[in-house]
Image (cartoon, rainbow, N blue to C red):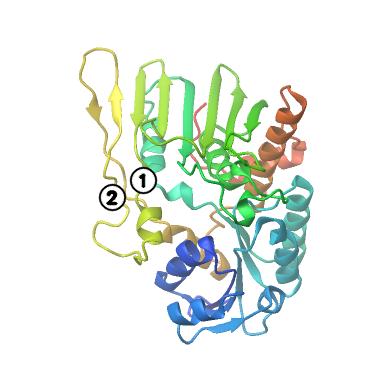
């Protein structure tokens, strides 16, 4: 597609993810035009996005004849079928995390995208969090030496079980499919595919029908990466705690972009993506911690990357091979929690090679 042509976008779903994340980003990235939205709440869409065509059927929007790119932000168990329909209709496709609810579905979509010659990408926006960018920089410069132990966590404090699909016993629900894809993707970007996965998943809240607490350890040679998420943590614990042979790095607080997007703010303010609580580097040589600077985060960079990939000007920012690797780790964790033992991510040698090829140039830690 010529780079002079604006890409026409259909957004499937106008719930939390569609309304708070995808729509604001699609509206503020040059070269993208949000033309169609599929939603069961047409009044809400028209109020926020006057002039956009609203359809009741996600399938009709996925195969719309006047759309170039389809963004799938529907409930998790529908991701695979809607992405498949869009690809077969000749569309480029973005799928919100998690990519799919099974590894088999992830493999099927990756193969179909190759056959169709279309860009298929996954919305792993947390690669553009300010704190993650700061950690990538620290590790690429070897500031912490050989990293031996990492704790990475996303927490919420929501003690009341809410009436929504994410908290019902349906495929793709629960905290591991909600927050786990972010944690796994960031870990794989830094350290590659682990040798094995050890997981504990639990329903901790009164009346919870799904897992709302998780602790998953990715096992590497001489390194453990512990991924944690809970709906019953009120704050205070570090977002990142990274320990190495030369010191430790602690980071409290979350990237500010989600909070501002949920509040209805469009990206673009002068302080957009600035980190209000920078990390601290501790070397053990003194009682003082060195405050570390964080690059600006900006989720718009993801969609700018998708645009350029469709135009043929850049690589896909999150490739199907990377998404398959994340799916393999997510599934290994489910198996580990169920069986009570470590599980290896079920990736073929070819899938390992594809993941490595698609992450060439990423500053992963040896």
Q: To which quarter of the image does residue 352 belong?
A: top right
Asked whether, in this view, residue 244 is left or right of residue 295, the answer is: right
Distance of mark 1 from mark 2, alpha carbons? Answer: 7 Å
Q: Which mark is residue 274?
A: 2
Q: To which quarter of the image does residue 137 belong?
A: top left
Between residue 52 and residue 89, name the one nearer to us: 52
Asked whether, in this view, residue 230 is left or right of residue 245, the answer is: right
Circle 2 — which element? Answer: loop
Q: Is the N terminus in the top left, top right, bottom left or bottom right quadrant? A: bottom right
* Residue 143 visible within the image: no
Residue 116 position within the rendered picture, expressed as x and y whole percent measured from the top left: 74, 67
Q: For the view shown, which residue lies furthest in the top direction?
A: 285
Residue plotted at (42% across, 25% down): 242
Residue position marked by numbered label 1 in the rendering: 130
* Residue 129 visible within the image: yes
Q: For the view shown, which residue lies furthest in the front direction?
A: 206
Callouts 1 and 2 close, C-beta under 8 Å: yes
Residue plotted at (75% across, 47% down): 102
Mark 1 crowd level (few <14, some 14–19, many ≥20, 10 Å Cα)? many
154 vs 90: above or below: above
Residue plotted at (37% across, 46% down): 255
């Amino acid at each position: 597609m010529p780079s002079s042509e604006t890409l026409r976008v259909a957004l499937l779903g106008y719930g939390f993810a569609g309304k708070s994340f995808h729509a604001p980003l699609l509206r503020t990235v040059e070269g993208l035009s949000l033309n169609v939205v599929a939603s069961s709440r047409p009044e809400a869409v028209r109020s926020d996005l006057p002039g956009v065509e609203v359809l009741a059927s996600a399938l009709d929007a996925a195969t719309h004849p006047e759309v170039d790119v389809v963004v799938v932000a529907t409930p998790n168990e529908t991701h695979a079928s809607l992405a498949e329909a869009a690809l077969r209709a000749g569309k480029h496709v973005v799928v919100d995390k998690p990519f799919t609810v099974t590894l088999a579905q992830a493999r099927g979509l990756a193969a179909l995208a190759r056959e169709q010659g279309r860009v298929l990408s996954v919305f792993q926006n947390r690669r553009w969090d300010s704190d993650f960018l700061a950690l990538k920089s620290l590790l690429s410069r070897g500031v912490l030496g050989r990293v031996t132990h990492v704790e990475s966590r996303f927490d919420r404090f929501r003690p009341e079980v809410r009436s929504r699909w994410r908290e019902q016993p349906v495929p793709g629900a629960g905290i591991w499919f909600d927050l786990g894809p972010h944690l796994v993707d960031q870990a794989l970007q830094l350290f590659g595919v682990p040798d094995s996965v050890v997981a504990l998943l639990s329903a901790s809240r009164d009346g919870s029908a799904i897992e709302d607490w998780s602790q998953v350890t990715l096992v590497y040679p001489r390194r453990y990466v512990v991924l944690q998420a809970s709906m019953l943590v009120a704050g205070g614990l570090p977002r990142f705690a990274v320990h190495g042979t030369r010191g430790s790095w602690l980071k409290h607080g979350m990237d500010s972009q989600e909070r501002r997007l949920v509040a209805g703010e469009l990206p673009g303010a002068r302080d957009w993506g600035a980190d209000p609580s920078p990390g601290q580097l501790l070397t053990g040589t003194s009682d003082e911690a060195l405050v570390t600077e964080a690059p600006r985060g900006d989720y718009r960079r993801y969609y700018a990357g998708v645009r350029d990939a469709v135009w043929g000007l850049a690589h896909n920012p999150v490739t199907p091979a990377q998404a398959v690797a994340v799916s393999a780790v997510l599934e290994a964790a489910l198996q580990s929690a169920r069986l009570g033992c470590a599980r290896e991510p079920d990736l073929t040698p070819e899938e390992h090679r594809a993941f490595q090829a698609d992450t060439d140039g990423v500053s992963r830690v040896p």
